Amino acid sequence: MKISIILAHPDKGSFNHAIAGAVLQALETNRHQVFFHDLYAEQFDAILPAGEIAREAALPAVIAGHCREIAAADGIIIIHPNWWGQPPAILKGWVDRVIRPGVAYEFLEGDGGEGVPHGLLKARAALVFNTSNTAAAREVAVFGDPLETLWKNCIFGLCGIREFHRRMFGIMVVSSEQQRKKWLAEAAEMVKNVFAVEA
């Protein structure tokens, strides 16, 4: 399978980078083809220019490449920290520029954009791994778990991906090395299970 991984954390020593490493190893062990992007390392330009908004817009080569990869992916994995209940701005910019009309969704004939889009992504599953310093129960009770709504409903569900999994790891600031090792093993196991090798 072709699996697209998008990582968004500025610190190469972060647990997000460790998750990405565990995920990559799990996918390579199962001989999947991987498209991997560390958005900060690549200095991805998160600003969506007005000229790119239209479906027919001519895209810069970097953005066109991301679009081709995400359209071809059989699975998508997103890795980022929970900052203010949102992804880092660089990842939001990636969504703005890559999860675009004609690539990830379209409006059907007779719909001028006021209706519910038809999803175009062919990926059968999406996984999101987050890190957080907020307790899971508080994230749900106080904030309503905005990242779950964002990724499951507003992005992947809208773009046609029905199988969705998300795991929030935390509380990071008080986690031990032993706990982090268990979390990395859990992330790798999730990836292996969701993107199991077909016999």
Image (spheres, rainbow, N blue to C red):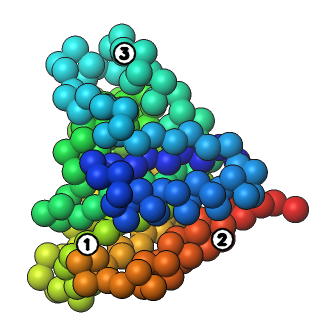
Q: Which mark is residue 59?
A: 3
The spot of residue 132 in percent (x, y) is 26, 72
Q: In this rendered view, identify the residue nearer to me: 7 or 55.
A: 7
Residues at marks 3 and 2 touching, judged by CB atoms closer than 8 Å = no
Q: CA distance from mark 2 to mark 1?
A: 24 Å
Residue 50 is left or right of residue 79, and the answer is left
The spot of residue 62 in percent (x, y) is 41, 21
Which is in the foreground here, disc 1 or disc 3?
1
The spot of residue 18 in percent (x, y) is 45, 62
Dot 3: element: loop
Return the residue at label 1: 132
Q: Which mark is residue 193?
A: 2
The spot of residue 120 in percent (x, y) is 50, 39
> Looking at numbered disc 1 in the image, what kind of residue is underneath it?
Ser
**Eyeballing the image, is 81 above or below 12?**
below
Which residue is at a point 61% across and 43% down the rendered structure image? 34
Which residue is at a point 40% across and 42% down the rendered structure image? 38
> Looking at numbered disc 3 in the image, what kind of residue is underneath it?
Leu
Q: CA distance from mark 1 to mark 3?
A: 34 Å
Residue 68 is left or right of residue 46, and the answer is right
Can the viewer see residue 111 in this picture? no
Which is in the foreground here, disc 2 or disc 1?
1
Residue 196, picture quadrant: bottom right
> Looking at numbered disc 2 in the image, what kind of residue is underneath it?
Asn
Q: Which mark is residue 107?
A: none
Quick one: label 2, few (<14), some, or many (20+) residues within 10 Å? few
